[in-house]
Image (cartoon, rainbow, N blue to C red):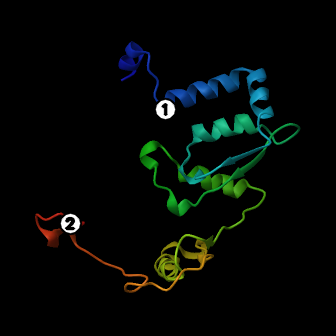
Amino acid sequence: YRRAKDRESALDFEDLQLRARDLLQGSDAVREQSRMRFRSLMVDEFQDTNRLQCELVDLIAGDGVGQAPELFFVGDEFQSIYRFRHADVDVFRERRAQSGGVLALTRNYRSRPEVLGVVNHLFSSEFGSSFEPLEAGGRFPDPTFGPPVELLVTDRKSYGTRRWRR
């Protein structure tokens, strides 16, 4: 893979991250210039980052003294889905433990209260004391057709050769 990339003068996403890290590590001027560009730095979906990406954030954010930007992380460990891309939810957990404060964002403006009630019921026992129930923040009209929430439990094997999501 490496030889093929070299032959084509190509870089993949990890190469770009490594080169950016090396550039920031190797040059005080580049690191300082990067810090000066930002007043605040927010990393969304932080549960899907890895240690290399966290290192990049730290190099830009600095030590929090002087001209370093304010640093914010937004994430939900229960939504970590990119392990196949080397995301490490432990990075999220470690940063949360080291942080100066955590603000739980439990108000949901996209989902109906009935849906959130089902989610809270199903997941509160699964995740234990670390689960914070979600609250509906939006107003929704009464459903026109049928119930607002319907849970369908299916078994792929029972569908035989038919497409199971049909």
| First reached walking from the N terminus: tag 2 or tag 1 | 1
Q: Amino acid at mark 2?
A: Trp
Q: Is residue 21 above or below residue 96?
A: above
Q: Residue at x 42, y 81 (%)?
A: 149
- Residue behind mark 2: 164
Q: Which mark is residue 68?
A: none
Secondary structure beneath disc 1? helix
Q: Is residue 152 left or right of residue 92?
A: left
Residue 50 % position (x, y): 55, 43
How crowded pointer 2 is (Cα within 10 Å; few <14, some 14-19, many 20+) is rated as: few
The span from disc 2 to disc 1 (Cα, nearest Å) is 35 Å
Q: Is residue 65 above or below residue 150?
A: above
Residue 46 % position (x, y): 60, 51
- Residue behind mark 1: 13
Q: Amino acid at mark 1?
A: Phe
Q: Residue at x 77, y 37 (%)?
A: 62
Q: Residue at x 78, y 21 (%)?
A: 29
